Image (tube, helix red, strand yellow):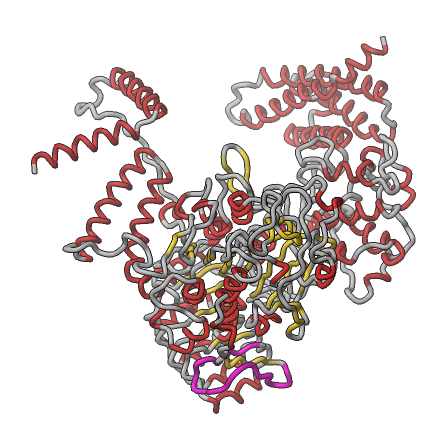
Amino acid sequence: MDVLKQLIGRLHPLIVHLPIGFIILGLLLQWYDRKRLEYQKAIPLIYLWGGVSATFACITGYLQYLGEGYAFDSVKWHLWSGIATALFSFLMYAKLKEIKAVDFLSKVPILGLSILFFILISFTGHQGGNITHGEEYLVEPLPNSVKSALGFETFEEKEIVLSEETWEEALIYEDVIKPILNNKCVSCHNPKKTKGALLLHNEEGILEGGENGEVILANYTKQSEIYKRMTLPIDDDDHMPPEGKTQPSKEEIKLIAAWIDAGHPFKSTIKDAGLDKKLFASLFPKKHDYDYPDKKIAAASQDSIASIEKTGVYVNLISKSSNFLSASCINKPAFTDADFETLLPIKTQIARLDLGGTKVTDSIFKKLIMLPNLTVLKLDNTAVTGEQIETLSFLDHLKSVNLTGSNFEEQHLTAFSKFKALEKIHLYKTKIKKKGVQSFNEGQITIDYGNYELPPIASDSIVY
Amino acid sequence: MKDIVEKLIQEKLAREVQAKTRRHFIKSCAQGMGGLALSSIFMGCDPLNTPPKKTAMAFSERDLNPLATLAPPLAPKVKSVIYLHMAGAPSQLEMFDYKPELHKYDGQDCPQSLLEGKKFAFIKGTPKLMGPQADFKQEGESGNWVSNFMPHFKNVVDDVAFLKAVHTDQFNHGPAQLFMHTGSARLGRPSIGAWATYGLGSENQNLPGFVVLTSGGNTPDAGKSVWGSGFLPSVYQGVQCRSKGDPVLYIEDPDGITRDLKKSTIDAINKINKEEYAKYADPEILARINQYEMAYRMQIAVPEVMNINSEPKYIQQMYGVEPGKESFANNCLLARKLVEDGVRFVQLFDWGWDTHGNIREGSIDMGLRNKCREIDRPITALIMDLKQRGLLDDTLIVWGGEFGRTPMQENRGNTKMAYKGRDHHGDAFTMWMAGGGIKKGASHGKTDDIGFSGIEGQVSVHDVHATILHLLGFNHEEFTHEFQGRNFRLTDVEGDIIKEILA
């Protein structure tokens, strides 16, 4: 008998959809028929069926509650609202059929009742869904900002950073392993939501293990469940974190492996655990050293890029990870100062500009200051002399200027002392006849005059 | 005349029959049947009784311009790569990996423990160890070791980062070269340059994105597959240019054909090819269309960029070029010119590094020394020249062979050889990289006292590939191409970025 009870109980998730269908159909028909009055006879019948099927749903639901061992607290809202829905459906039937027993409702407008009914069935359905899928089922895919605005607890990924000077003093669990687990595992393995009866938010939980037993075997990484699961193929059902969730990086998995191999110490420092610096390389702060400023900007419009490319200037994203652009005249040697206007629609996005080998002159400098994020500028093999190059000192991000093969004159060198971010200037084959590398502006700027030589030596001509 | 026309018609018919595959046949049958059925249904509806229209394949932007530049997924450190490959495998023990201890064991039998389970190409029985045949010195601020076989190299030693313990799993030239350039010892995979141009395109629309230069002599044992495109569209394969004679074969105007006539010929051919593509949707047809157009543009651009005579005398002397000949020095200068003009990937192959000791040219103390002299000045000049033009920051230079050489003297067939030589050895050898994003003066990895195995910082060929792709702005694990039902990567299922040599 118990088997039957449980079996019928398990039909509940199926049967509930019957009353939902009937009731929604009834409500829709009521709205559709509000003026035509063609289906008036059908509507009460639908609600009657709704009520009957809702009763069945209530019975199976109750059996499921008994059979599956839910706590009453967790199902009570769904249970009571389910019963209320069944009763309400009969009530709607009675009201539409104008049965005497419900005369007390004759003053209440039918529209009000319908709206109330709609809210009731939605609420009941939602409560049921929460029981099957968990309370955060619908919220989970939302971005963290929306989640916290809705009042849900969020598990935000926190960046893990170790300093390259003091990394050995950092605590291996507290500063490295725990943050990794917090970022990648704890959103499902915490005291509120404990998938697989496994807690990964603290030492006790990790040592305790989950419903399948221990997750860590000291010094045996490859046998440790936590490691095994992370290294299974992503489409394996047992892979953790599940497909679709943020995956730990290769470096993070290696760190966890190294920690288990070292006997998973919870209190010791990295030094005491005897771990190699190489393992932590990905956690040291990264210096931004690319050809564009370290900030976020809006993307340039595709139309403006396309229209600039039509003129023969190449425009490309420097990388898909930022909106900064690189513009190059490699296929347009005829580019002149006047053509600069065509670049203005993307002036904020240009970080790399290659005007090498073009017809630009010194008047380009005044125009270039319209590119606030210009980082790398190539003016090699042009006729510029450096007159008015000091205007470029307004550019906050300009890091490197290539003037190789231009007519740059020595008298304009001093202009560079005002530049804020400049690191490198190339002045090979200019009017300045110097050789090698010179440090400028207290070592901030390196000037490369080139003219390197490789004098002949005796062995050049010895053939063995 | 009539004969010729008839022949052409015959040829056309024959080609058409060849081009039709079983699939086309079945497809046409199905369409024919469909057409029949349709026309019977609509009989009378359509006075002209037009046959049902076939849907033509649409061209994507990338199909029409496969070398158009694409942004890399991650911030790149370099835009171009110059890969210098010493085919035949240079001896690390006479160039960069200094093993003073090996002197002590010179002439002694190699310990059996080292030989157990190892396969060598030629060594049989118990070979004798052979001490370094070069003198070493620590050079530059980095204090990295360079031998007297490479006397100029000290000038740039602080610009490069050494990998002292690279290993490969191949010990014969062909497979090892394939592995080094395609990530697989078997044929069929795209080379690094093909991957790079496939993923990034190339900036200069008048030049190929991937240029290959060989120093004359033998071509690499693995053949042209080392710069092939594998399963990628063939437009991404390396274009071999020559430093002697016509830079690219068959792109000059034939006698009596003007440039204009050639242009209209190419336009007409391409028009037909486009119609063919609409019919068969074979991407190889697109590759052909592009090759024609590229070849036409190259006619003007290539002779210019490939002309080393236009370079000033002092630059020519710096590289040690020999105009009119095929040489590694010429190719180094060309490599700079190509990179300066926006070519994405330049692959240089030098030959004659297989120093077994069987002949004078293939000896460690003489042949190798000559080879080193031939590359020492050009490579040093290349790095200096790129540096002074501000190009080194945007370029990655990779140097290496397909494997290294044994600390033992080769004893081919268990005999004493005529000259001093070393056998193939893949367990530990030296490579270096220089340029954008590379830690200047670094040295990563260590070999044991005799240079037989890596004992620290061992890196695989896949790791080298992962690092090259990383510098170009790719995550090597996500840069894939689907072929025969699965995604392929240059690094297969391996590869770690060698962070130790990154700035």
Q: Nearer the viewer, residue B197 or B227?
A: B227
- Name the image quarter holding residue B35: top left
Q: Nearer the viewer, residue A75 or B189?
A: B189
Region in magenta: A424-443
Residue in the image at 86% along x and 62% along y: A169
Q: Quadrant of the C terminus of chain B?
A: bottom right
Residue in the image at 45% along x and 85% along y: A386
Q: Nearer the viewer, residue A9 or A418?
A: A418
**Residue A325's spot in the image, x, y percent?**
49, 63
**Residue B219's spot in the image, x, y percent?**
43, 50
User: Residue B392 vs residue A363: left or right?
Assistant: right
Residue in the image at 74% along x and 44% along y: B112
**Residue B141's spot in the image, x, y percent?**
66, 75
As displayed, is residue A266 above or below residue A16? below
User: Residue B3 vs residue A123: left or right?
Assistant: left
Residue B466: tell me if it is visible: no
The secondary structure that most of the magenta stretch takes on is loop
User: Residue A335 vs residue A268: left or right?
Assistant: left
**Residue A271's spot in the image, x, y percent?**
87, 58
A340 part of magenta stretch? no
